[in-house]
Amino acid sequence: MAEGGTIAVVGLLGGVPYGPDAERALREAQVVMGSPRQLDEAGIPLEAEAVPLRGPLEDVLAVVDQRSAAGARVCVLASGDPGFFGIVRALGTRVGPACLAVHPAPSSIAMAFARLGLPWDDATVVSAHGRPLDDAVRAAIDSGARKLAVLTAPDAPPQAVGRALLDAGLGTRHAGEGEGAAVAVVTHVGGHGERVVRTDLAGLAAGDFDPMSVVVVVRAPVTDGPAGPTLAWGPGPPAGGPGPSFGLPESAYEHRDGMITKPEVRAIVLSKLALPLGGVVWDVGAGSGSVGVECARLAPALRVIAVERDPDQAERIVANAEAHGVSVDVVEGSAPTALDGLPDPDRAFVGGGGLDVLDAVRARLRPGGVVVATYALLDRAVAAHERLGNMAQVSVARAVRVGGLGARLAPENPVFVCWGPGPS
């Protein structure tokens, strides 16, 4: 056992201790605690007392604490790395880190990515053990990571994770030929019943998998083969290469009779939105969809929803999103009624509609969210400022050639940009 440690926490790989220190800790233990399966597989000493751990976590911790306090050399068995979404956090909180001698095995996450031949230093990892599945999925989505790994549980099996990810819109956020989300379910990694199933989000949601698995989701190209979709790994854009630009010229979008948010105004709107890496963005009164498209360009993991009442404009939004290789969900209808049933937004841009639309959007905004609205009329802008707390006038003048004499500045109509809630 490590110096000062009175409770050994031993990580198992394939049901057995990993490394000589872990083996010694198990061999010298007087009391060995773990799940019935772990006790069967680990090969505990004949002279040691086996104590199955069942029930709520607090009850488990109390049993470990009591046996250790009575003077027994206690060994607690765990799967993989017990410091990674494992018992070390809770046990250390109860008895103190100095009382623990931790002997980790490779985590199931590390093993799962290894089986897939993928690095995972850029992955987001969440656990569905002991927390609501919606919270785990939300954390994964909000991270904006290209690679996700979810530790599943009996009350949140892989297929439930798949349904939750689809409901959160993950499968609709990347457009372009050959783009999507590739999925692997890795079960009993390192053990005799190890199994790797490659599929996609729809296959994950419709499947029937062992609840004690790791679900790996890679937002990357999907290659169709005889066995179905397979994970495809690419290096992505080179470090230091150009990122997605914003405030693109009007010519970058199909639009009708100048009905488009001007590039300079669009750039300011995007700065005030302060886009998160993931979450939901509404573009209400979207017109040509230029703001929503640029939101999707800047943060590809966002779910962008454009609401537009004009059918012709709705078609333009679809065309503009496809032209820029991003995914924008288009809802055809008039706000605020068209907002019913949509997921609540983390960010929202209101480019059309009256104050009733702004009020409806504000009422649905998630905590910590931001609304940005633009107006051409001062009275509406002042009323919006009273609601949101911030307003600026944006005046743009463009250079226009005057024959061979030079250039003059031609002013555009001023636009009022309001944002909030609250001063900033």
Image (spheres, helix red, strand yellow):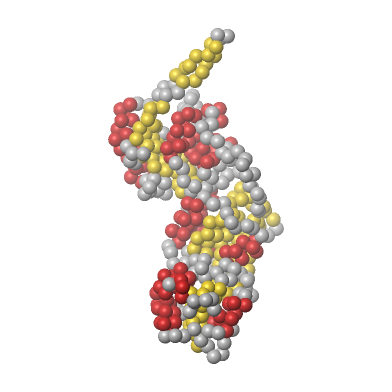
In percent of width and height, residue 280 lies at: 45, 47
- Tell me if I can see residue 352 in this picture: no
216 relative to 348 in the view: left or right: right
> Between residues 196 and 415, which one lies in front from this camera angle?
415
Residue at image position (44%, 85%) is 71
Furthest residue to the right?
226
Q: In the rendered image of this protein, does residue 161 appear above or below residue 253?
A: below
**Dividing the picture into quarters, in which one does residue 357 lie?**
top left
Furthest residue to the bottom?
47
Total numbered badges shown on the rendered structure: 0
Furthest residue to the front?
3
In percent of width and height, residue 412 lies at: 44, 21
Residue at image position (57%, 84%) is 27
In percent of width and height, residue 364 lies at: 36, 46
Residue at image position (35%, 32%) is 391
> Between residues 28 and 48, which one lies in front from this camera angle?
28
Q: In the rendered image of this protein, does residue 419 appear above or below residue 43?
A: above
Residue at image position (42%, 37%) is 272
Q: Quadrant of the C terminus?
A: top left
- Tell me if I can see residue 111 in this picture: yes
In percent of width and height, residue 281 lies at: 45, 43
**Dividing the picture into quarters, in which one does residue 214 lie?**
bottom right
> Between residues 128 and 203, which one lies in front from this camera angle?
128
> Between residues 247 and 90, which one lies in front from this camera angle?
90
Q: Quadrant of the N terminus?
A: bottom right
